[in-house]
Image (cartoon, rainbow, N blue to C red):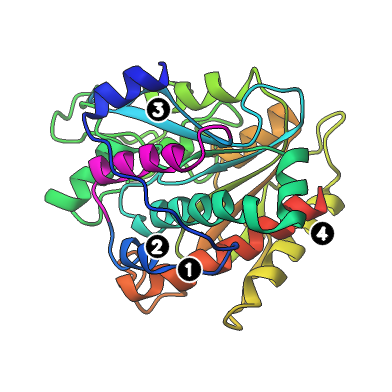
Amino acid sequence: MSFRRFIRCMACVLPCAAMSLIPGESTASADAYDSAYHSYSDTAARLVSYVARDPGLVHLRSIGHSVQGRPLPALTIGDASGPAARLLITCGQHGREWISIAVCMGVADRFIDGYSSDPALRRLIDKHPIDIVPIVNPDGYEYTRTDDRMWRKNRADARGPLPWCSGVDLNRNYDYRWDGAGASDDQCDENYAGPAAFSEPETRAVREFVEPRKYAAAIDFHSHHQTVTYSDGPQPPSAPSRRRLAEAADRVGDAMSEPYGTHWETGTTREVLYRAEGDMTSWLYGVHGILALTVELRDTGKYGFELPPEQIRPSIEEACHGTAALLADL
């Protein structure tokens, strides 16, 4: 979908406010936005305003549509179509993980302005342009805002014999060890992997966006645990070694601890959290050989998925540090 059609579909354009900051720092305008969680439509409008700030640097497109027809926006910072190996950032695969969407938006905001004010960051983005998909599951997210705050899956209609059990866990719907350990074939389970790999329009959109492009690395932001993890699957040909994955996870975790002294545990997803097969980062690494990390944001359990708004900005700062560290390590 073209940028012009995306704007028409959103039917909302925000005025541009000039900002000047580096990743992790803030202005009054950014502070105001970062003081609350926002609806899908407000998020889409904010993305449009990012393009207005620097149309030569920032590019916006829709990569597909959700099961309920919402456009899935993707923002690019840097060269939109060149041959350089890119960094992919994704957020909002699970509806209830509001902080991940806020973090994607905040990272985009800081890196857009940091490009003009920080020569080192500019060199990194010129070398590795950034693609950000800030809300992979907009239907699930909106459902958590209006009906069920703890909803995890997308909003696909029930396909099996139980009409009251709807939705698919998008982060179990990728075609690598699909329906394996950590996934469920029970349509009522919150880890339901779907009737087939890539059965959902949201995951198909991610696949169709990723596969034509060359990526050096990827971060998939989730909540909550304060961890940086990677696939426990075997190393594919030409992929980064497992030692390389571990080193990258450690660097990102160390960088995220810098702003506030928070602790970030690192290791394979299986070692640190649980088995999770059919997930995005395992697919990115196992199928495409991309250095892919899953970052579980704040906190470690006090607030869980209901992280209060006053922790949005600290979470953004931590994510900016981690993202910059990964870029510098590529």
Q: Please state which amino acid type lies under the numbered disc 1.
A: Ser
Please state which of residues 32 and 55 is positioned toward the viewer in this rendering: 55
Where is mark 2, residue-wise? 30
Q: Earlier in the sequence, mark 4 or mark 3?
A: 3
Q: Secondary structure at mark 3?
A: helix
Q: Is residue 47 above or below residue 106?
A: above
Can you give x and y, in whole percent of width and height, for residue 192 in the image? 37, 37
Label 3: how many residues lie within 10 Å, few (<14), some (14-19) or many (20+)?
A: many
Label 2, label 4: how far apart the Cα atoms are: 32 Å
Where is mark 3, residue-wise? 202
Where is mark 1, residue-wise? 26
Q: Please state which amino acid type lies under the numbered disc 4.
A: Glu
**Most common secondary structure along the magenta stretch:** helix
Label 2: how many residues lie within 10 Å, few (<14), some (14-19) or many (20+)?
A: some
Label 1, label 4: how far apart the Cα atoms are: 30 Å
Residue 55 among those drawn in magenta: yes
Q: Where are the magenta residues, as a range?
A: 38-56
In the image: residue 147, left or right of residue 98: left
Nearer mark to the viewer, of 2 and 3: 2
Nearer mark to the viewer, of 3 and 1: 1
Q: Earlier in the sequence, mark 2 or mark 4?
A: 2
Q: Is residue 177 visible?
A: yes
State yes or no: discs 3 and 1 in contact (Cβ < 8 Å): no
Label 1, label 2: how far apart the Cα atoms are: 6 Å
**Which residue is located at x 71 percent, y 49 percent?**
122
**Which residue is located at x 39 percent, y 33 percent?**
185
